[in-house]
Amino acid sequence: MKKVFSVFALSGLLFAAASGLYAQDAAADSAATDTTAVAEAAVEETPAAEPVVEEAPEVAAAPSFTQILKKWFIDGGPSFMGIILVCLILGLAIVIERIIYLNMATVNAPKFLGEVENALNSGGVNAAKEVCRNTRGPLAGIFYQGLDRSSEGIEMVEKSIVSYGSVQNGLLERGVSWISLFIALAPMLGFMGTVIGMIQAFDAIEAAGDISPTLVAAGIKVALLTTVFGLVVAIILQIFYNYIIAKTDSIINTMEDASISLVDMLVKNSHK
C-alpha cells in the first residue's frame, strides 16, 4: 500500500510540475503574442514620413517693353522727353492725314481717260464733264476745268489746266513742310538734352569735388536717352515723309501725262 501511495504521490508531483511548466510556457507565449501585436499596431499607427519637396526659387518676371520704355522716358527727364513725344504725335497725325488724302486722290488714270474719251466721242463735252463730276480726285477736277474752257480754244484749255494743276499740287503737298520741321526738331531737342545732361554731370562733380562714376552716371544717362529718343522720332517721321513725297510725285506725274492726253483728245474732237 505504501508503494502504491508513493506511486500516486510521485505521479501527482510530476503532474503538478508539468502543469506549472505548461502554464509558464502559455504565459510566455501570450506575452510574446501581445508584444508582437503591440509592435505591429505601433508600426501601423506611425504615419509614413512624407517626402520633402524642395521648392524651386522664384524667378523674377522680366519687365515688358512698355515698362522699360516708360522707365527710360522718366529717367530721360519729362521736360525734354515730353517735347520730343509731342513732336512724334503731331508728326504722325499729319502723316496719317496726308496718307488718307493721297490715297483718296489716287485714281486709275488709264480707265478714267478711257471713260472721258468715250463720253466725249458719244455725248460731247457735257457728257465728259459729267464723268468728271462723278469721279473723285484732283485729276477729275483738272479735266473738268479744261473741258469747261474747251469752247474758248485749246490755248485757254492749256492755261486752265496749268493754273488749276498748280492749285492741286499745292493741296497735295500741304502739311509736308511741318513733317520736315518735326524731323529736324526732334534730334535737335535730343542733342539739347545731351548738353543739359552733361552740364548736370559736371555740376555734380563740382559740388562733390571728386570724380566718381555714381556722380556722373545720372547726367550721362539723361544725355544718352534724350539723344536716342530724338533720333528714333526723326527716323520714324523720315520714313513716312519719303513715302508721302514719292506718292505725291507719282500723282503729279500722272496728272501731267493725263492733261496732255486730254488736250490731244480735244484737238481730235475739234477736227471732227
Image (cartoon, rainbow, N blue to C red):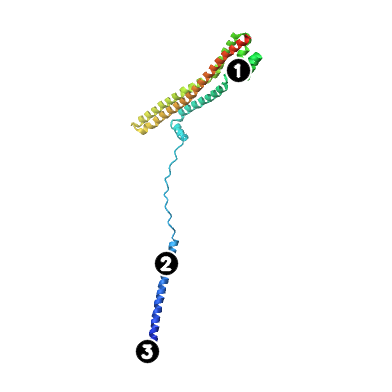
Give the quadrant of the N terminus.
bottom left
Residue type of the residue flagged with mark 3: Lys
Of tags 1 and 2, the one toward the viewer is 1
Write down the residue under mark 2. Answer: 36
Disc 3: CA contacts within 10 A as few (<14), some (14-19) or many (>=20): few
Relative to the observer, which residue lies in front, 55 or 153? 153
The tag earlier along the polypeptide, 2 or 3, is: 3
Asked whether the viewer can see residue 124, the reply is yes
Give the tally of numbered discs: 3
Kindly identify the residue that appears in the image at 62 percent across and 13 percent down: 147
Please tell me whether residue 143 is drawn above or below residue 230 in the rendered image.
above
Of tags 2 and 3, the one toward the viewer is 3
Q: Does residue 201 appear to the left or right of 265 in the view shown? A: left
Kindly identify the residue that appears in the image at 46 percent across and 29 percent down: 81
The tag earlier along the polypeptide, 1 or 2, is: 2
**Residue 257 placement (x, y as % from top left):** 55, 15
Circle number at residue 3: 3
Q: Secondary structure at mark 3?
A: helix
Write down the residue under mark 1. Answer: 114
Of tags 3 and 1, the one toward the viewer is 1
**Residue 168 placement (x, y as % from top left):** 56, 17
CA distance separating discs 1 and 2 = 112 Å
Give the quadrant of the C terminus.
top right
